[in-house]
Amino acid sequence: MSAVIEIAGLRKTFRTLRHGSRVAVDDFDMVVEAGQVHGFLGPNGSGKTTTLRALLGLVNADAGELRVLGEPSPEQLARVSGRVGAIVESPQFFGNFTGHRTLRLLAVAGGVPTSRVDEVLDQVGLWDRGRDRVKAYSLGMKQRLAVASALLKSPELLILDEPANGLDPAGIREMRDLMRTLAESGVTVLVSSHILAEIQLICDHVTIISQGRRVAAGRVDDVLAGHDQHEWRVRVADPERGADLLRTAGLTVTVHPDDLLVVGGAQEPELISSTLGGQELWVRELTPIRPDLESVFLDLTGGAALPRQADDAGPPGEPLIELDLTDGRRVDA
């Protein structure tokens, strides 16, 4: 597979009005291969949204190399922009326009056949609400409309920042199914989300950023396996006797009121079963305790809070304006 996103040594510094210079991203690397559904995770202030902005030419990087579909960004981004669909942070629409009119205007402006409007409304589940004004939409419906706008160009690369924001459980499942369908059709998807259980279900690869630096990257299964402590939950009729037998066999055991926590290697289920069964203490339950993406995320980021809004926003009370040190422009935080 060829890389559709390449980021090497990205660095970006902002100057806040109250706290002075702040490094948002520092020597950050990320590669997204064609055909992947790639999760991009990071806590509040980790630099995730800044990375996406730099990748799409919305802010100027201080250092590093960025490529989108093989072209350097932002220098040659225009060459491939028609093949990229993206939503970054909360989208804004004219409230008095209908969803259909909004997408039609975007299609005309982007040189996209207007026939795509009805197609993408159907894709995101807004077919029956397309003629309603956007101001009557819920937060989740506006998010669906944003995803629809990103799909207008039938992109090869789709970048979605918190696409499940405001969606109810049924909407989250529909968004998951949509991303899977897009991936099966050959679209590469880069998605950020604070719903880590969804990322684990949807994505095959993941990159985790903390304090502006990459702390993990790779296949989701490999990242989880790297934090597997080979723990097992064991239930027997006599936990204390069971713990003594397993310790004698060389295993580390912690006794809980209802079960035993046993730490060992990949072959330990056989040893646990044979050790206890050999003394006629029969195993009622033997369950592996495997790490999930949330526990690994919290471990790698020091228990940092998951993002609820823009992940690069300043501390409480900080004016939501930042100065891009590259050319002094004001940049929305």
Image (cartoon, rainbow, N blue to C red):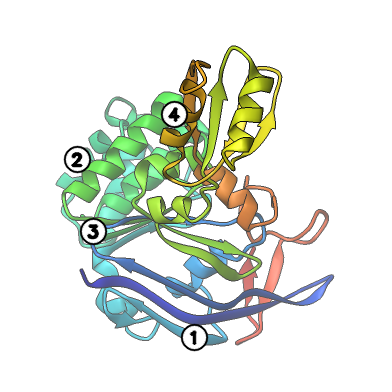
Amino acid tagged 3: Gly
Q: Quadrant of residue 231?
A: top right
Q: Quadrant of the N terminus?
A: bottom left
Q: Nearer the viewer, mark 2 or mark 1?
A: 1
Q: Amino acid at mark 2?
A: Glu
Q: CA distance from mark 4 to mark 3?
A: 45 Å
Give the left or right position of residue 129, taking residue 89 as reference.
Answer: left
Q: Reading the chain from its start, which is encountered first: label 4 or label 1?
A: 1
Position in image of residue 128 (x %, y %): 29, 25
Is 7 placed left or right of 232 in the picture?
Answer: left
Dot 1 amino acid type: Gly
Q: Residues within 10 Å of mark 3 (few under 14, many from 20)?
A: many
Q: Mark 2 highlights which residue? A: 119
> Quick check: marks 4 and 3 in contact, CB under 8 Å?
no
Precedes in sequence: disc 4 or disc 2: 2
Q: In the image, what residue occupies the spot 60% across and 29% down? A: 245
Task: Kindly report the distance in space between the C-alpha atoms of the residues bearing marks 3 and 2.
Answer: 22 Å
